[in-house]
Amino acid sequence: MTGGERPAMPPVRLPSEAELARDALAAPLFARAARLASWAGDGGADATGGSGGKGVPVGAGGELLAPQMKEAVAHLGLSEDEDGAAHTDQAWHLAVDTGLLEVEEDGDEDEGGTAGSAESGAARTLTEEPVGFARPGEELAQLRGGGSPLDVLEIWQGGLESVLADAAAPSFEDLVGDLDAVTDEDGKIDPDAIDLDDLDWNPEEEADFLDGALANLYLLTATDQAVSAGAMVPLPVLAASMIVPDDMEEPTDEVLEAVSAAMMRLDEQFRMLAPTGLVEYRPVDEALTEESDEDTELPEQLDDEDVSRYGMVKLTPLGVHGVRTRIKEAGIEAPAVGDLAGAGGAELLGALSEYTEENARAEIESWLAARTPLEAARELLGAAHGMDEHAPSRRLACQQALSLLGREAEPALRDVLEDRELGGLARVWLVEHGADDVPQPDQEMVFWLTVDTIAAQLATAGEAAELRGLVQGLVDQHTGFFDKAWRVDHPATAEVLEAMGRVHPDRQTAKEARKAAFKARSRLEA
């Protein structure tokens, strides 16, 4: 990568900050954290001071004590939930990590310190005796109406980072393997029995694995029309995208085992992340893992029912925002639809090839909204000029943008009717918009526009199935097509004819296309 280049992701479409902030406040884990922070303010009889106004008593590191944990579970309405205590503990820790709660341990005031996270008491022995108090932090007011949508999103993002770190860390049981080997006769963990050098865990590798999964989900959301519209991604597909090499036609048994292992890791991680509002997740059917004590293995063929049983996931709009924020912080460009509203026509047309059809339309509409139809048409047509390798793609994008303009833009299109590069697309636009007195194009213009259009499709979509149908139609409509086409004065003529030779199903016609391509290339070199 050269010094002026930066890695870039495709553009994504995002709701407004206000909508995203509402989603953040509604995320189950964050909603519970905020409720617990408010509850802590009421837990000391007088949350603003006095002997009973210190907040909720906590143990070392800000842990809830047993009596307070029971009250907190009840406050969240989770008393009947077998996982109620676990959900409450997660929400409490999130409140501490994000500053919704401030923990002040005994002696902190004298020492001038405040314990803002559970790490502050990590070296102390946990006890059921209170060693301090938790009370609402300044961040809580930001969530309760005192902050802007951006303030809310920043708090959410900070909490997300905390949960991502937890999701990337293995459970204690997974880390040490055999729990019996590290517990004493009283059933307590014996620290001396744990050999830290033997622990099979690389924190950076685990974090990279989860980051990679989220990045792939982000790419699918940005580039796949169905996923962008809300379709869920099968977990085996996501896992395979991280494991199977691009050039591997048939995965080996070893690779399939690695995909299965990755899938089960992702299942655990997405279960933890779903309450943050980052992803919508349909977990792996637990019956699959209960059917066998061995690792879950994917069958060779999956029908629709099988796919759903193996887990389904997608980024929520809030999740797209969260992953995009992390991508940008990593120094990678991550554009959003609407970023080009103030850009010039050339920048707009040059970027649209990276957009899905829906996102491209939204970007164009945003750009057009800042201009009159006539101004927009003239700027777009001016930017579509050129004979460089990207010019056909710009002209194709120009046609897409012009299609959204009404008859107010007609004078700009009539101004370029005699232009060799733009006259063909101008005629198409005028006819489609019901204009009168549109001059017929000559044969040279028709063939030039044909080559330009195919060149643009090759550059943006490759040799897709649609191109084969287009090529067949062109050859059938024009007698002696290739004898005329190789003479077209367009930089991409030879390349287009070679592509036509590759995709046309008739062997004789394909041979004629290759001969025409050779003539075009020889003419260009002469």
Image (tube, helix red, strand yellow):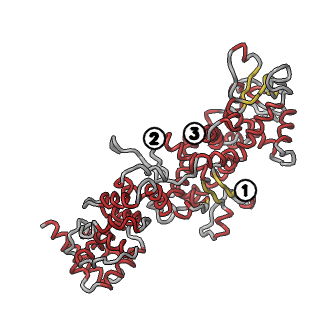
* Element marked by disc 2: loop
In this orientation, does residue 210 appear?
Answer: no
Tell me the amino acid under the disc marked 3: Asn
Is residue 257 positioned above or below 74 on the image? below
Q: Quadrant of the N terminus?
A: top left
Tell me the amino acid under the disc marked 2: Gly
Residue 109 placed where, x, y %? 72, 16
Extreme left residue here? 526
* Element marked by disc 1: loop
Disc nearer the start of the sequence (2/1): 1
Tell me the residue that label 2 is attached to.
331
Checking the image for residue 293, the label placed there is 1
Residue 225 placed where, x, y %? 52, 63
Find residue 71 and report its image quarter: top right
Q: Residues within 10 Å of mark 2 (few under 14, many from 20)?
A: few
**Residue pictured at 72% horizontal, 56% vertical:** 293
Residue 54 placed where, x, y %? 80, 23
Q: Are marks 3 and 1 in contact (CB under 8 Å)?
A: no
Is residue 425 positioned above or below 210 on the image? below
- Left or right: 375, with 50 as reference point: left
Residue 93 placed where, x, y %? 72, 35
In this orientation, does residue 167 appear?
Answer: yes
Q: Quadrant of the C terminus?
A: bottom left
Checking the image for residue 424, the label placed there is none
Compute the Cα span from label 2 to label 1: 43 Å
Q: Residues within 10 Å of mark 1 (few under 14, many from 20)?
A: few
Q: Residues within 10 Å of mark 3 (few under 14, many from 20)?
A: few
Checking the image for residue 202, the label placed there is 3
**Residue pictured at 27% horizontal, 80% vertical:** 511
- Left or right: 78, with 213 as reference point: right
Q: Are marks 2 and 1 in contact (CB under 8 Å)?
A: no
